[in-house]
Image (cartoon, rainbow, N blue to C red):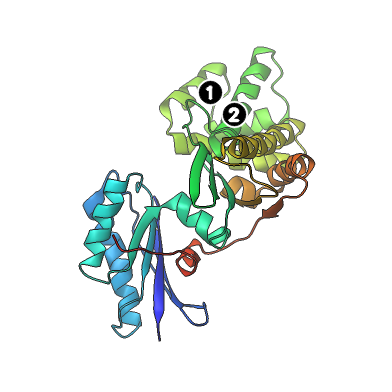
């Protein structure tokens, strides 16, 4: 069997999937530890190599036709080339290392042009058209990341602070948030924010989604606004495109857009209003499938 391996290396785990090149079907998946080429290059090479080794072993030691590796921290050409050399020396010459956003774009848009909007802890849009690529957003939580999990959480925290200042703390969102942080005052909220990690704060977005399901008007309003902000990110991406794009394909990824229908429907409403001929792709797809669509040129 002629097969290829697509690899998704993230901050939580690494996933490698083998695909039969003829049928495009997944035949085996292996998982190993987390990677980040920027902060732990050698360990990242080790974790990805373990995943590849497991795949090759399952395929009776036949080497893959090509490898596509999308990984956190693969943000510079120098880092990517260095990583490619590590894997070329052992597995095969047809290796390409890209960042995780490019991997998702290639998988969800099947290698075609379009815009990918990601909303997880942060938010970013990646555009691709006629061989050109550009990014919009992704400035980080201090400068932007509108519509992200962190942004949603901060908006909810600000709402609760206002409620406490006005001595109106009986609504569902305020009560739920105070209970989650085990506090009851403005000082408790400030202490939580300034002593918690970005991921911990962004994690409150799940609580806000739960309160929206309980018909909290405040939570629903915040989530709808997140959808609008993500649609505005698409607008900025189209404005930043090197050449005008007509009727772009728009793919979405990340927990807020994939799991939260309030955010997605708000996003979709604005997109359909402002870009009526665009198509929106919202699919749970193994991003390792990007290897089936990517052209890999040996450097």
The image shows residue 211, relative to residue 193, as above or below, that is below
Q: Which quarter of the rendering shows the C terminus?
A: bottom left
Question: Which residue carries the number 2 mark?
Answer: 178
Residue 189: numbered disc: 1
Residue 84, located in which quarter of the rendered image?
A: bottom left
The image shows residue 87, relative to residue 248, as above or below, that is below
Q: Callout 2: few (<14), some (14-19), or many (20+) C-alpha neighbours within 10 Å? A: some
Dots 1, 2 in contact, CB < 8 A: yes
Residue at (69%, 13%) from the top-left corner? 166
> Element type at marker 1?
helix
Q: Is residue 122 visible?
A: no
Q: Nearer the viewer, residue 56 or 272?
A: 272
The image shows residue 58, relative to residue 15, as above or below, that is below
- Measured in 3D between alpha carbons, the distance from the residue under mark 1 to the one under mark 2, in whole angstroms, is 8 Å
Query: Residue 107 at x, y = what percent?
Result: 52, 61
> Which residue is situated farthest in the top direction here?
166
Q: Callout 1: few (<14), some (14-19), or many (20+) C-alpha neighbours within 10 Å? A: some
Residue 44, located in which quarter of the rendered image?
A: bottom left
């Amino acid at each position: 069997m002629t097969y290829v391996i697509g690899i998704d290396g993230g901050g939580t785990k690494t996933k490698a999937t083998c695909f039969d090149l003829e049928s495009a079907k997944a035949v085996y998946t292996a998982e190993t530890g987390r990677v980040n080429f920027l902060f732990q290059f050698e360990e990242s090479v080790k974790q990805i190599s373990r995943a590849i080794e497991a795949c090759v072993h399952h395929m009776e030691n036949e080497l893959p036709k090509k490898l596509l590796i999308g990984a956190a921290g693969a943000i510079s050409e120098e880092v990517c080339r260095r990583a490619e050399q590590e894997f070329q020396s052992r597995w095969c010459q047809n290796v390409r290392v890209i960042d995780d956003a490019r991997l998702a774009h290639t998988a969800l848009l099947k290698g075609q042009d379009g815009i990918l909007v990601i909303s997880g802890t942060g938010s970013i849009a990646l555009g691709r058209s006629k061989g050109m690529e550009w990014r919009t957003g992704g400035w980080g939580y201090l400068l932007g990341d509108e519509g992200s999990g962190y942004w949603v959480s901060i908006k909810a925290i600000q709402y609760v602070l206002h409620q406490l200042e006005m001595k109106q703390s009986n609504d569902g969102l305020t009560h739920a948030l105070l209970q989650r942080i085990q506090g009851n005052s403005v000082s408790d909220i400030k202490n939580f924010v300034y002593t918690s990690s970005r991921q911990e704060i962004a994690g409150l977005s799940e609580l806000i989604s739960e309160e929206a399901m309980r018909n909290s008007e405040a939570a629903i309003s915040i989530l709808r606004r997140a959808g609008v902000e993500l649609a505005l990110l698409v607008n900025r991406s189209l404005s930043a495109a090197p050449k005008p794009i007509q009727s772009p394909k728009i793919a979405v990824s990340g927990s807020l857009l994939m799991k939260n229908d309030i955010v997605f429907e708000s996003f979709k409403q604005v997109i359909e209003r402002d870009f009526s001929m665009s198509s929106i792709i919202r699919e749970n797809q193994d991003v390792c499938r990007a290897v089936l669509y990517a052209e890999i040129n040996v450097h």
